Image (cartoon, helix red, strand yellow):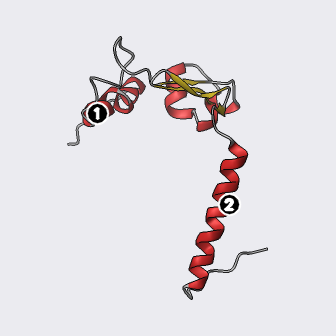
Amino acid sequence: MPIALAYTVRDALEWATINGAEACGLDAEIGSITPGKQADIIVVGNGSFAMRPMHEPLGSIVFQATTRDVGTVLIAGKIMKQAGKLTGVDSDRLAAQAESAAGEILDRVRESGATLPTVPH
């Protein structure tokens, strides 16, 4: 007879935070909000429809939140994303670099003689 295991959303959060840090041997530095540890924190919840209904906030975060619901990100106490936007990043320049790199890669593939699938119009 199989054994039924019951896990909670708090268990899932611990797997993603302190247990993940322990698995990497970094639990002395990260994985929980503790004095002396690196402040890696995300702030979730912007009132999006994906987070509704929110009867139990932790459950909504674990089961319903998407990347769009992450409004603020701190890494080592430094704000890297605020109000849903990356800080210190020129998004237009980064997008242009990505497009340019993709074009260069495709050019090299074509020069190698490889046949690429056609792109539907």
Name the side, left or right, on which 68 lies relative to 74.
right
Mark 1 nearby-residue class (10 Å; few <14, some 14–19, many ≥20): few
The location of residue 115, given as percent across then percent down, is: 59, 86
Label 2 close to label 1 by CB (< 8 Å): no
The location of residue 45, given as percent across then percent down, is: 62, 24
- Sequence order check, earlier mark of 2 and 1: 1
The location of residue 86, given as percent across then percent down, is: 63, 34
Q: Which residue is mark 2?
A: 99
Instruction: Look at label 1 and name its amino acid.
Output: Leu
Q: Which residue is mark 1?
A: 5
Q: Name the foreground residue: 56 vs 96.
A: 96
- Identity of the residue furthest to the right in this view: 121
| Residue drawn at 68 percent across, 41 percent down | 90
Name the side, left or right, on which 56 lies relative to 86.
left
Instruction: Look at label 2 and name its amino acid.
Output: Glu
Q: CA distance from mark 2 to mark 1?
A: 47 Å
